[in-house]
Amino acid sequence: MLYFYSDEVYTEVMGELVSSRSSATETEAARYSSTSHLLALSLSLFLIAVALVPRVLLATRLDMVTDEIVYFRAGRLYFPLVTHLQFWSTAWSYNYEHPPLVKLLIGAALALNNTIGHPLPDLLAARLPGLLSGTLLLPAIYLLGRRPFGAQAAFLAALSLALSPWLSYFSALAYLDMPMTTLITVAFLLIWHAHARPGLYPVAAALAALAFASKYTAILAVPPMILYTLYHFCVLERRRPPLKYGLLAVGIGVLVFLLADPAIWTNPPKRLYHSFLFELQHAINGHDFFLAGHYMTHVPRWTVLYILLVKLSVFLTIPAGLFLLYGLFQLVRFHLRPTMELERASALAFGVCWLGGLLLTFCLLNIVVGTHYHLPLAPAVALTGCAALVAVLKAGLARIPRPHPAYVLVPALLATCTSHLLGLLTVPAAEGYTSEPFQGENTTLQVAYPGYRDAVLWLAQHTDKPARVGLVARDQTLDKKIDDLSWFAFNRDLPARFQLEEVTPDQPAKVYQRYDYLIWPAHLQQRNAPLPAPWAHHIIYVFTGGQTTYCVIAARP
């Protein structure tokens, strides 16, 4: 049977059909978007939970580490200056060589802890800014890294860094580096999103300014940001960058930095000059460091590559290097014969500019106090490394019709996370972790954790008599003799039968004979301060983390 419709009826019927199909498509898209957001939220919470466990455990168990006492004292000093509006006080000159933002956060954490009844030990309260920023870094990497690097790679990178002993250790300390790393990483990731939403440029600039107000080395990430932005607009899209937002970003960045650095308010040029002059003199004079089996005061240009190779799994670092080479090759091909989508070319350029740019700028550092100097490169290495690994696995599965996502995720997960997880589980204090090819830090990198408290606790368990114990350290490392803040003040709970004293490693032999035991950190032995020969034959305990020796206990010969 045939039905004949007029044009008006036909148009109305077809319009209703198209409308119903469009409505169904929109409903399905909304349902997919809701599921996607829920999954992203769930994975972000999972990353936070995974990251918190090792960081909280380390923050509650680690002994006070060199420089923590400086930032603790500065935080306790700076915060009342702000609350009492004493911006002209000479107290701001204490530790002026580093900007005050993280130290102010440490002071705020101490003040809050005191206000609510002191539920946390002071040292743990001071470690909260690093702990929280080191934890929040991971969902930020996942959420902001999904579009340029892919959701699978972003999740794997975040999970691998959540389990990284290197990042876990420095997240658990009252140091400046982890808050700075989090701020500059989020700022860099926003730069990729900003080419589609230029309003994000001022936000990225504000975060970069806060990172600079946390530690000056954050400035080394700014040239790669500018490079990618100019490359994207001037080369890939061949149009003028959004100058209005660029100028706004510069203005907001300068303003945020000034607001976040009250130490310079009275005379910004003069005080910044003094800070930068200190950094310049530090670079000229050098700082002793142990690297690749050698003691030195100025480090070679390849130091950043070596530290990343030692402290991160080779299943991240090697694929990251391949990403860099492949990305450069593909971008050259794109300009010779543009067959690649513009967004994919932009994502490759972003990864190349981020990782390659940071490698170039951080290799300019001729001094390294510790491996924490290079923490800002860890997110770039993890994201590019995981992106390369996922791409290789997908290419290997190309002949399989509709391969299950687990075929990619499971091997990539095992490759990127196994070494880090084993490091957390088997390396006490986490700092002694080294990647797969290396056998501990003692012959590769300067050991950062001294382990005095751990050694004294071992003596408490294995001896039962009063003893005089010498804690060997550089002069006034443990006891500054300025106020009540010292290593001894934070370790008053150690057994009273031990008479603990700081002793320098350059004393004559007769001075050491006053002590029943000497606790000698490995980093001193690495830096031309070996255990004296008579004592070296009476070592009774070696405190290790994995295959890394943190310190030794020697009995009086």
Image (cartoon, helix red, strand yellow):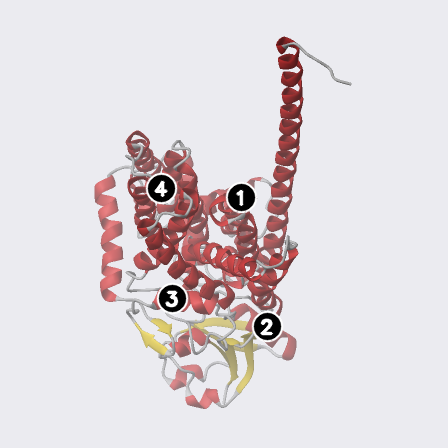
Q: Above or below — where is 388 with respect to 350?
A: below
Disc number lying in front (4 or 3)? 3
Residue at left offset 34%, top offset 41%: 261
Dot placed on the residue nearer the N-terminal end, 3 or 2: 3
Q: Residues within 10 Å of mark 1 (few under 14, many from 20)?
A: some
Dot placed on the residue nearer the N-terminal end, 4 or 2: 4
Residue at left offset 67%, top offset 27%: 24
Q: Amino acid at mark 1?
A: Leu
Disc number lying in front (1 or 4)? 1
Name the residue that disc number 2 marks: 497
Q: Above or below — where is 132 with respect to 81?
A: below
Q: Nearer the viewer, residue 27 or 381?
A: 27
Q: Nearer the viewer, residue 261 or 153?
A: 153
Q: Amino acid at mark 4?
A: Ala
Q: Above or below — where is 289 with respect to 381?
A: below
Disc number lying in front (1 or 2)? 1
Q: Residues within 10 Å of mark 3 (few under 14, many from 20)?
A: some
Distance of label 4 from label 3 (alpha carbons): 26 Å
Name the residue that disc number 1 marks: 143
